[in-house]
Amino acid sequence: MKKINLQSFAFLLLLFVSCSSDIEKGITEEVNWVANIDQNNEYSFENGVYLQTKMHDNTTSKITNVDGTVENKNSIDSTDLPDEDLGEYNNFQILEMNDKQVVLVNSSYSADDGYNTKTNWKFTCEITSGSLAAYNAGETIEVKSINDQEYDKASEAYGKAIVVKSIERADPYQSTFKINTSNHVFLINKRDIKETVNSSLDAVIKLLKEVKE
């Protein structure tokens, strides 16, 4: 799923909680988080839908704490699959396909972010290898998302919302999230879809002053 792994968010939130407030009065506190995220997801075809069956998330990040210390963190995860017992899902459907383009719809539901988030997002992709005829013959074709900018903007808002909801001191107006997807490719055949996503995150979390009683 082309989303920042919620486990990465959880790590950042734990960092917020552990941050001390021994900073000189009048100086703005902030946490900086820079990350490179590489995701590989697999979806198997079942009853007209490609259901997520595998994932591999490899995230490297650098976090600068409020006191200026820097932490480098590498996270490799293959466990954050939808929990069917909670009703979670992450799947793709082919909405349209012609000789030049494929339109995919990604539907997902997550129960662990505090929002019960349900999304339906359309990706218009160009065919970079193969053809409609090849797909119909059972072969694998390669397609690339044409423009992920709108999805990235939605993910930025989603990320900020999680942080602000979870951390009382996070300033929703001054904090910034910037996500840029540099590569988003699908290998598609009638049996499965393999999705590769390469993206970067640059976040600055401004923290409101603690009120001393």
Image (tube, rainbow, N blue to C red):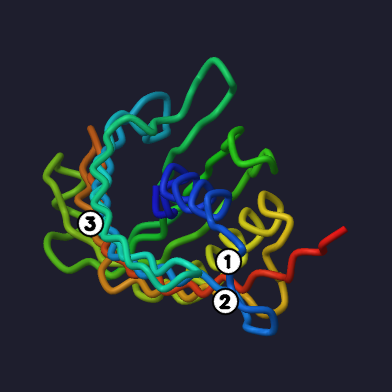
**Image height of 70 relative to 47, above or below:** below
Residue 199's label in the rendered image is none
The amino acid type of the residue labelled 2 equals Thr
On screen, residue 31 versus residue 53, left or right, reads: right
Q: Residue at x 61, y 78 (%)?
A: 24
- For the residue pair 193 and 181, the one nearer the viewer reads as 181
Which amino acid does the dot numbered 1 rest on? Ala
Which of the 4 image quadrants contains residue 4?
Answer: bottom left
Residue beneath disc 1: 154
Between marks 1 and 2 in the image, the one whose residue lies nearer the viewer: 2
Q: Describe residue 133's horizontal placement relative to residue 184 as left or right.
A: left
Q: Which residue corresponds to the image point at 27% horizontal and 46% vertical from the top-left?
A: 75
Residue found at x 70% / y 43%:
115
32 or 69, nearer to the observer: 69
Of residues 43 and 166, the one drawn nearer to the viewer in this rendering: 166
Observer-side mark, 2 or 3, equals: 2
The mark nearer the N terminus, 1 or 2, is 1
Mark number for residue 132? Answer: 3
Q: Secondary structure at mark 2?
A: strand
Q: Which mark is residue 176?
A: 2
Badge 1, how many Cα within 10 Å: few under 14, some, many 20+? few
Horizontal and vertical percent position of residue 172: 71, 70
